[in-house]
């Protein structure tokens, strides 16, 4: 595993000590370690110090706001509406490179990395060049579909009070070496999955060393998509599961699908294919706003009981509790790290997604927080469910950061066949839910990368989940 650079800068900060005292103490402690290392030829002082530093970060993740939501009121990498009072744990990370010209020492473990703003950076560039990644789905490929402006690519996410580490694709591949990462959820998680695959591909010297295990044909029939990075023996998969629970299509007398039912008490059948993955990133959200789901008439089912009507908030809660029970009873948290990505904001002007809502012509993010939409009801439910789980869940709360980015959607820049089908189906020709790639989901993966660093995945021999 790649080691942390300049590990002397990693220290613990508690409220009853001053920074000067802590720094002095850390130097003394590190000196003792290096002195003891001088008596052995097996390990270099730098390696021992790096190992120590990584272990400190790994331990800190269980006490800092970057650990997990639990019934003991520990904060999770999130922007939850509740405040947590915990000892402050600060980890200082030096990046491999610092092209943005800021201080290379970046404190980020003690701050909420999801609470910040988008800043226009002249030297900002996407994690992979526009039009360079062959794995971007046509629906997200705004460049291919004719979007002429690129101003939306010049904004980067800046948390308040700290800097996040610069995304290093090779280092992340080292974190993932020999492992399987799986994205499970709807097309917004596919948005994020494609972004990560492209960002990691860009770091490869030989881009032929990434292989498509299953292609678009298998995805359409099986809902499964996978890439393998050969030199790192790791795979990054996407599994379609928009509700996380099982949706059934019941046949009529002629064997054709007649009506749909959502089993709120049953996890989707594909769950058995990823239960032993090393890292799983879940999401569900947008499909709960669709008409059939939101009205809930003769659609939701538990056991043999079909609800004539059921409020979508209650159905969503039941579904998440089913997911949470499956995670707690099935996932081995000693080897598998569980993430849940929060709700990604949409920006349909004037009308809804299926009645001609628009976002075309938006070229700048929202700058005034008073213009932001309210906190989604789904996230309040999600946070309460996660808080009751025994399995640590890392909550990637990207809701607020996406709320600003009305400029980052494909809008009218979609494949022609999708536009035609949309016009025929509902008159909707604009996509104001998904995101252009490269684009906003790249920042989600930067925060995922930062979280993996802090949670101990970058430690030597870092299979300690």
Image (cartoon, rainbow, N blue to C red):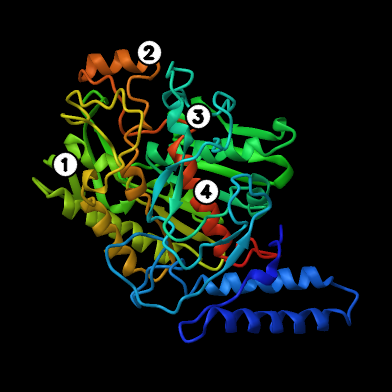
Indicate the position of residue 417 as horizontal and vertical percent values: 37, 14
- In this view, the residue in front, 378 or 63, is 63
Q: Which residue is mark 4?
A: 446
10 Å crowding of disc 4: few (<14), some (14-19), many (20+): many
Residue 167 shows up from this direction: yes
Indicate the position of residue 347 as horizontal and vertical percent values: 26, 35
Give SS at disc 4: helix
- In this view, the residue in front, 48 or 316, is 48
Q: Reply above or below: 51 against 317.
A: below
Q: Residue at x 64, y 63 (%)?
A: 463
Indicate the position of residue 360 as horizontal and vertical percent values: 30, 23
| Residues at circles 4 and 2 in contact by the CB criterion of under 8 Å | no
Q: Quadrant of the N terminus?
A: bottom right
- In 3D space, how far apart are the residues under numbered discs 4 and 1 (Cα atoms)? 33 Å
| Marker disc for residue 294 | 1
Q: Which residue is mark 2?
A: 416
Name the quadrant containing residue 426.
top left
| Residues at circles 1 and 2 in contact by the CB criterion of under 8 Å | no
10 Å crowding of disc 2: few (<14), some (14-19), many (20+): some
Instruction: Name, please, the residue furthest toward the bottom.
Output: 16
Camera-nearest label, 3 or 4: 4
Q: Earlier in the sequence, mark 4 or mark 1?
A: 1
Camera-nearest label, 2 or 3: 2
Left or right side of 342 for 256:
left
Q: Earlier in the sequence, mark 1 or mark 2?
A: 1
Residue 298 shows up from this direction: no
């Amino acid at each position: 595993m790649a080691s942390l650079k300049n590990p002397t800068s990693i220290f613990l900060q508690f409220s009853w000590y001053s920074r000067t005292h802590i720094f002095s103490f850390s130097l003394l402690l590190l000196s003792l370690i290096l002195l003891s290392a001088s008596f052995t030829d097996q390990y270099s002082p730098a390696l021992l110090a790096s190992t120590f530093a990584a272990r400190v970060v790994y331990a800190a993740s269980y006490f800092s706001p970057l650990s997990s939501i639990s019934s003991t009121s520990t904060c999770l990498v999130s922007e939850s509406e509740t405040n947590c009072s915990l000892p402050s744990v600060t980890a200082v990370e030096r990046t491999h490179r610092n092209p943005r010209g800021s201080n290379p020492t970046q404190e980020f473990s003690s701050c909420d990395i999801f609470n910040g703003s988008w800043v226009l950076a002249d030297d900002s560039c996407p994690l992979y060049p526009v039009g360079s990644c062959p794995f971007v789905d046509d629906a997200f490929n705004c460049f291919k579909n004719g979007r002429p402006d690129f101003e939306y690519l010049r904004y980067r996410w800046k948390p308040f009070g700290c800097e996040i580490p610069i995304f290093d694709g090779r280092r992340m591949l080292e974190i993932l070496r020999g492992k399987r990462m799986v994205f499970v959820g709807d097309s917004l998680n596919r948005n994020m999955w494609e972004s990560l695959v492209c960002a990691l591909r860009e770091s490869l010297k030989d881009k032929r060393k990434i292989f498509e295990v299953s292609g678009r044909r298998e995805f359409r029939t099986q809902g499964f998509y996978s890439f393998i990075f050969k030199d790192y023996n790791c795979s990054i998969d996407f599994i379609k599961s928009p509700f996380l629970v099982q949706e059934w299509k019941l046949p009529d007398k002629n064997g054709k699908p007649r009506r749909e039912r959502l089993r709120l008490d049953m996890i989707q059948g594909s769950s058995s294919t990823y239960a032993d993955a090393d890292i799983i990133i879940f999401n569900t959200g947008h499909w709960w706003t669709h008409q059939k789901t939101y009205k809930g008439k003769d659609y939701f089912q538990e056991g043999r009981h079909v609800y004539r009507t059921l409020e979508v908030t209650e159905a969503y809660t039941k579904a998440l509790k089913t997911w949470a029970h499956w995670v707690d009873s099935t996932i081995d948290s000693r080897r598998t790290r569980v993430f849940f990505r929060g709700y990604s904001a949409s920006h349909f002007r004037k009308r809804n997604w299926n009645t001609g809502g628009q976002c075309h012509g938006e070229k700048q993010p929202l700058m005034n927080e008073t213009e932001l939409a309210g906190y989604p009801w789904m996230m309040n439910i999600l946070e309460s469910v996660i808080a009751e789980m025994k399995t640590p869940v890392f909550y990637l709360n990207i809701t607020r950061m996406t709320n600003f980015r009305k400029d980052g959607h494909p809008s009218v820049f979609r494949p022609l066949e999708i536009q035609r089908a949309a016009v025929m189906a509902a008159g909707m020709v604009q996509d104001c839910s998904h995101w252009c790639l490269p684009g906003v989901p790249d920042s989600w993966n930067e925060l995922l990368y930062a979280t993996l660093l802090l949670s101990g995945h970058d430690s030597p021999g870092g299979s300690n989940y």
